Image (cartoon, helix red, strand yellow):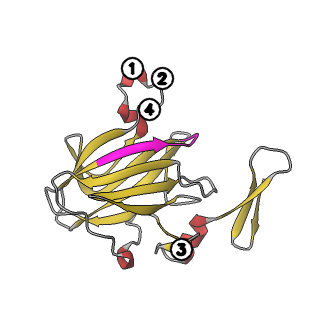
Amino acid sequence: MLRCTDGAVEFTLGIKNQMTTSPDFGRLFIESKGQPILHAGRMLVLADRIQASKGQCFTVTIEATSSSHMQGVGISEGVVIFGEKVKRGVVWEYFSLPPEQRSKQRASLPFSFEVECANSKGWLSFYNMAEFHGRQEWWHGGSCMWVEEIPGGRRYHCNDFELNEDFNDIVFTVTSADAQPILPPDLSRQAAPGR
């Protein structure tokens, strides 16, 4: 059951008569026009845009997932992933396994892969994605993340589209593979790139 109530959504968790109220982050991001929002003392973003120069390499590690939906990391605006140059790419948690094992096991985490900036724009964007009935879902409902600065990079604690605030649906890191520092985010430029 869903019912909107003054900026929050109440929904049933499948337990009779138990209601949980969580913010509708999708609506809050629409109101902020994609700009970061402050929630429970954390700055939430739809995507994190980091400074990157053409040819600069990053190591992305999917550390953990905790969702009933398949999770992935979206990377955009000109990137080389697994040797293929694409405008936007997504790496799903199941890429951690050979294809013949994917029907028996969901993922083998942690899983690291390399990403190379293939654009001259000066940045790459990283964001979380989920798979739902064969569709890629991102930037609506509960989808967002908070960013933790770590030595040599950042850790992303992400919510998928479900309306909750656990921020553990996918946790991944981005670190510089070539010892260049990852510059702190400029929150004034954190609007989500075009879909």
Residue 104, image x, y percentages:
48, 21
SS at mark 3 in the image: strand
**Around disc 2, counting alpha carbons within 10 Å, would you say few (fewer than 14), some (14 to 19), or many (20 or more)?**
few
Residue indicated by mark 2: 103
Nearer the observer: mark 4 or 2; the answer is 4
What distance separates the C-alpha of mark 4 from that of mark 3?
32 Å
Residue indicated by mark 3: 38
Between 106 and 3, the one lying in front of the other is 106
Q: Quadrant of the C terminus?
A: bottom left
183 left or right of 65 in image:
left
SS at mark 1 in the image: helix
Sequence-first disc among 4 and 3? 3
Sequence-first disc among 2 and 3? 3
Residue indicated by mark 1: 100
Residue indicated by mark 4: 107
Q: Is residue 54 above or below residue 108?
A: below
Sequence-first disc among 1 and 3? 3
Say which amino acid is labelled 3: Leu
Between 105 and 110, the one lying in front of the other is 110
**Magenta run includes residue 64:** yes
Say which amino acid is labelled 1: Glu
Residue 167, image x, y percentages:
54, 55
